[in-house]
Amino acid sequence: MRIIVDAMGGDFAPREVVKGAIKALMEFNCEIILVGREEIIKKEMGDFKGKFEIVNADEIITNDESPVKAIRSKKDSSIVKGLTILKEEKGDAFVSAGNTGALMAGGLFILGRLSGIERPAIAVLIPTEKKPVLLLDVGANSDVKPKNLVEFAVMGSEFYKVAMKEKDPKVGILNIGTEEEKGNIVVKSAYALLKEVNNLNFRGNVEARDFFKGDFDVVVCDGFTGNIFLKTIEGFGKFLFDKMKLEIKKSFTYSVGGLLLKPALKRIKDSLDYSEYGGAILLGLDKVLVKCHGSSDSKAIFNGIRAALNFVENDITSKMKEALSGLKEVKD
Amino acid sequence: MRIIVDAMGGDFAPREVVKGAIKALMEFNCEIILVGREEIIKKEMGDFKGKFEIVNADEIITNDESPVKAIRSKKDSSIVKGLTILKEEKGDAFVSAGNTGALMAGGLFILGRLSGIERPAIAVLIPTEKKPVLLLDVGANSDVKPKNLVEFAVMGSEFYKVAMKEKDPKVGILNIGTEEEKGNIVVKSAYALLKEVNNLNFRGNVEARDFFKGDFDVVVCDGFTGNIFLKTIEGFGKFLFDKMKLEIKKSFTYSVGGLLLKPALKRIKDSLDYSEYGGAILLGLDKVLVKCHGSSDSKAIFNGIRAALNFVENDITSKMKEALSGLKEVKD
């Protein structure tokens, strides 16, 4: 298998990307194509020069650029080039820690949508009491129709089967109550549609409060709600840990307590890091595309490559197409 | 001033409610009318029998009842009776820890909306790094129009002035990015409307991640998003503290560390308890109505009464009416 890696994407590119790619090359039976500024990439390679194919791309799309504009104007960027050679089947998957919006926009322009999908989605695996739960959409679609949530549910379920080796993932809607009549117009209609989908283990609504119990495997929502959910976790987690640090400084006893607990607290913090699980996934494009967190270190890139290999090996794209072909036509 | 208190509302009613009311009676210069089953209330009063007026109400609306149905069928409930005597101006405000939906539905039927308000909202004060931030709506309106968010902003701002003694509260929209063009259709239109409102310190979008920095005073959103935000904090907070407990049990060193830190951790937990700030507030009804958390103890009830007194003293209802009267007509 051949994995295309965006060497210029992410806050610590190209160094951490190349390090992650080297690790993956040593561990897995695969080829890696690095896309980006050749001379800079080569400097980071050390003894591994010649072990990678490099496709030169002089431009970089940064995180503060408008996605659509960047994709249109920067034809020689690592994202556009990477997606283009993926489309040309020079590789089996594309891994990038770059601008998520640009990856989604570029994926739509260059790769196209999976047949049966109107709106691709961004998914993340979120740690819970029992297991990581897949949440989607977390930002690609601020406004959705009920049938889009059905597409998310089917894609998410197929993804979960392959990524988490779960036979029959439990699917739910993120909502403000568990009863069928709860929520806004979109989730209420989506509930009615999801009940009728064959081969989908739909289990109803899940409240944000109960999400962390991990009783569901896949939870769907519009991209606005999902993004709020995700960023709330991030912000609140940071707020809590900062508060703890402040408290610990307040007395000698506390600081001793804090010192003793330090490794445990660090372990908790690390376990909340969702880059651990291979990065966010763009679902609904006609190829495998793995998005790593913008602040990815080499470990996160390595995990992204590992995830990409798993998806290609299990032919996740075909599986999704098949599951989606079984959906009934729904009018908007 | 006379505060009407729902003696039957909340998980620990009537005992904790009566205890809270007694505390308030001792501390503040006010009268309190307790509404509920007279004989039970009297049993909880101890030496304070005769110090309160009691209005008998035989029925109780529980938390799992459908709000609208309950309000219609239980005319002799503490909520319906309490709201009715508030409407009749036998008291200046109503404090209840009962069914939020029923309070909102009853408030709409019996008290009516504040002039200038299409959709009343539920607001809560959420602790952040700098100060408590008012978030609304957190559940009354799952679907909103842009102009409703404007109403929330104006009501929230007036509320914050009185409740938090802040002269010119900074108002923001809860969103998935800070730029004006970010978000779903509703928040984008609301942004354009809010920019034009006079006498409102509108400062743009605030990301969920940055909410806890406390740079804004009032943050508006639809009730679906707000409820997800609130329940995410609740669920994630519990998840983190449970994880910590598990880690602490893992070794002797950790358990010593945990023991030393226990008071600090408890203080953090307590500081996150939003009942501390006087309970949730129903804004947009034509009287002062304070909703306490369902699990309110006597302290929370006491705080709710204190908040109600402050709102009446400052004539918050008139202030909101005035601010709302300045809004331009917006077509739906």
Image (cartoon, coloured by chain):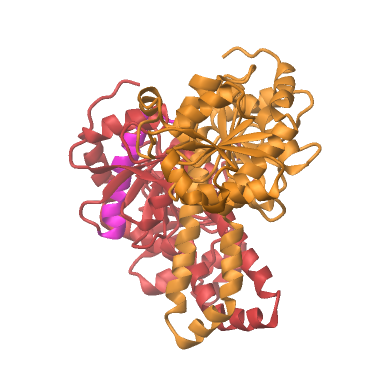
Chain colours: A orange, B red
Report the residue that reaches farthest toward the right.
Answer: A167
Describe residue A322's horizontal placement relative to residue B53 as left or right.
right
Q: Does the magenta stretch include residue B146?
A: yes
* Residue A300 percent coordinates (x, y): 57, 50
Q: Is residue B274 left or right of residue B168?
A: right
Write down the quadrant of residue A268 in the picture: bottom right
Q: Residue at x 67, y 12 (%)?
A: A329
Q: Look at the image and give the residue range highlighted in magenta.
A: B144-165
Q: Which residue is drawn at 36% across and 31% down?
A: A66
Q: For residue B323, what is the image quadrant?
A: top left
Q: In this view, does B119 lie above or below B247?
A: above
Which image quadrant: the C terminus of chain A? top right
The one nearer the camera, B194 or A307, is: A307
| Vertical placement of residue A143 versus B209, above or below | above
Which percent across, then down, holds residue A229? 52, 45
Q: Residue at x 45, y 59 (%)?
A: B33
Magenta stretch prevailing secondary structure: helix
Left or right of B246: which side holds A52?
Answer: left
From the top left corner, tell me how far across and down residue B89 is, in percent: 36, 48
